Image: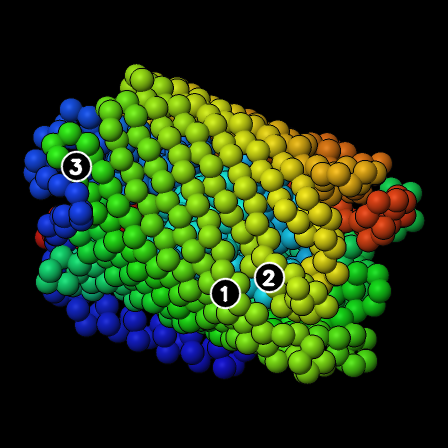
Amino acid sequence: MRRISWRLALAGIALSGAAAEDSVHAQTAPGGSAASPLPPVTVTAPEAAARRARRAEPSSRASATRRAQRSPVTQSAALQSGAGLSSGATPGRGEVSSAVTALPAAVTVMDAPAISRLAVSTYGDLFRSLPGFNVSNYGQGGIGYGLSLRGYTDAEHGRDIAYSIDGVPLNEVSSLHTPNYADLNVLLPETVKSIEIVRGPFSVEYGDSNMGGSVNITTKQAEPFASVGVSGGTQGTARGVATYSTTQGAWLPYLAFEGYHTDGYRDNSFINRYNSFNKVTTTLPDGATVSFRAQAYGTEYGSPGYASRDAITAGAISERSATNPTDGGNKQLENFVTNYSSGALDQELKGTLFVSHQFSNRFADFGGGQRVQHEDRTMVGGRVSKVWSGAIGDDIPVQVLLGSNWRTDVIEAFQAPTVGRAVSAPAVVNVGLTQTNVAGFGQVQIKPLPWLKFTAGSRYDQFIYDINDRITPGGTPNISNGIASPKVGVAITPVKWLELFANYGQGFRSIDVPAELIGNPGIQPFKIVSREGGFQLTFDRFRFLASYWTTDSANEAFQADAGLPVTFLGKAQRNGYDVDARWFVVQDPVNSVSLFANYGGVSARLVDAAPSYFVPNVPSYVANVGIDFNVATVNAQMLSGSAYVTFVGRKNLTQDGLITTSPYSRVTGKLAYSWPEGWTAFTQATWYPGDRLSEIAINFGNPVNASSADIFVSAQPTLAVLAGLTYRFPTVMAAAAPKLVTK
């Protein structure tokens, strides 16, 4: 902890000093770059292409997006809609654009104002109200949540979604916890500019883990104010957060620091955490933008373990009791990230370089005795992409995206039985490995008719493993796998208010060395094929999205919980549908009130495996109904917030479907009141009106013929309440025209 503390202090002092040193300099306005021609076809210059574009409208909304990013008014309510569209400011599926909303897929985009209206106690709350998501809180301290999309299980720490923050991948390949373990506890909600979600493996920019979908998080560059906030609530929860930023000067800082503590609902479920986010951005003479970011994060936590569902319902034990009072762990992370961007939105050249180091220890007892999982991981890598936009002749808008990414993880992994956190027997895993992923990707969009657009792309990922198995030297051979992931789609827009879309995409997950490759030297990466078709209706005050999808998996890999053995279930098929609707009751530059509802139905079945019919831990449906609002009251004061009810269907806990959870619901709400002097007071609550044992329920017995005695749970609190106060003060001098937009 001391080692991380002094690194944290140095990083914060260095970046704060750089911001102060350049605070007197004027900011250089970014500029665009000329479009590059498209070889080897005849391509018109951007000016000529624009004339045709005004008829077919392939890029007018892209320009509007650029203007909207600079506008004081954000279209946050619209951006949170299932399609990610915002009153003409965001490109739709029928437009030739590099915006994620132009993909022929089910996409959701959420911006900073929308996030500020959500009740967020942990990062999982960012996703709970969004269409298609199933979010489960394990209640085991500072470990990654159970996030899932498109019929994947919530028991595997979000491993089947590809996550990135500012172009840096978050999934931990070859993790001891679970393959491609995803821990987003490092994310500070206050630092988030936008979250882009693509449901299904339909974005060519994501490879490993892009099976249920992808989540791309972009952090802020600058705001014209600083802030100080404190909050507290039930379960002994206390949080303090401070930010500093300004939109003046050649170097624009965004600095944030968080301190957090909670006792947790169950015994031995405390969390202590610090998080320091330090980012500075500057504009180069040629108009390019460069950001440098350093982050330091640390947490220590207790884990109450999982308790017998039968014993709790019979009153034999308390739902709050801990299975093993010495379970828990810690994690520390430091990273440094550089982002580069040059050119207009649809001619953009982007690059990312990153280096990250983390180590973690987790002590957990799942009924067979406690064991420790220790990992020390260094990750380095980068990413580059370029977009060219133009037209073939003077008639056919076209866009080409090319890119490449590289990532190398150097990992030390150790697992052994322990008693009271002391190693009690020889290690069962003791491996050092280097895993490298090199990939290239490309995509073409072409619009031969004003109402028709085709999208086609592919990526190729090469994985290289260098393994040192210290328990069985030479027993785990080095391997090298290459995986292609083609993707195609079509969008039809016969009238401006209707979008029809269909797509086909392949996705995959890489092999995990400790959990899968050791003992299975011939195993191959896990591949899926997914198809989707849908439509969206977009009117001034109403949006409606519906899609039907199906996914085929060649070999289903199931893990009841982190650290337990991986079971291979064979072929599986998932199918389902998403429905997402939003009605803007009030929508003007000052006031917004919208009602929303979404529903995702899922069937996840094993193929030719009777009597094993079901993929475990997949709810039959997840639905949300709610409201969000931001309205003026008196004297420039504002009332904002959101409230919604989540309904989660029954989950099969065994492959034969004989043991299940019960359907349950959750009510979540937040109310905030702001004064023009800079003060904001808020309160938020989460309430489980009925079943509190079904969000997390795990089968520790036989996956086919288990009994109810094999089901273990982690109870959720009936009610969790949080309240706080934030003060914002301007950092822009009165002589300068303030930019009231979050960058």
* Residue pictured at 17% horizontal, 58% vertical: 288
Residue type of the residue flagged with mark 3: Ile
Residue 335 - label: none
User: x, y (%) of residue 327?
Assistant: 74, 67
Work out how far the residue at label 1 is from the one at label 3, CA to CA, in angstroms: 37 Å
What x and y, as percent, mark residue 537? 39, 20
The kind of secondary structure element at disc 3 is strand
User: Label 2 vs label 1: CA separation?
Assistant: 9 Å
Q: Do tag 2 and tag 1 residues touch (Cβ < 8 Å)? A: yes
Q: Mark 3 points at which residue?
A: 392
Residue 246 picture quarter: bottom left
**What residue is rendered at 52% in x and 81% in y?**
2
Above or below 273: residue 118 = above
Q: Residue beneath label 2, please?
A: 511
Judge left or right: residue 517 versus residue 150.
right
Depicted 492 relative to depicted 186: above or below: above
Per the model, the C-alpha gap separating discs 2 and 3 is 42 Å
**Tag 1 secondary structure:** strand
Residue 391 shows up from this direction: yes
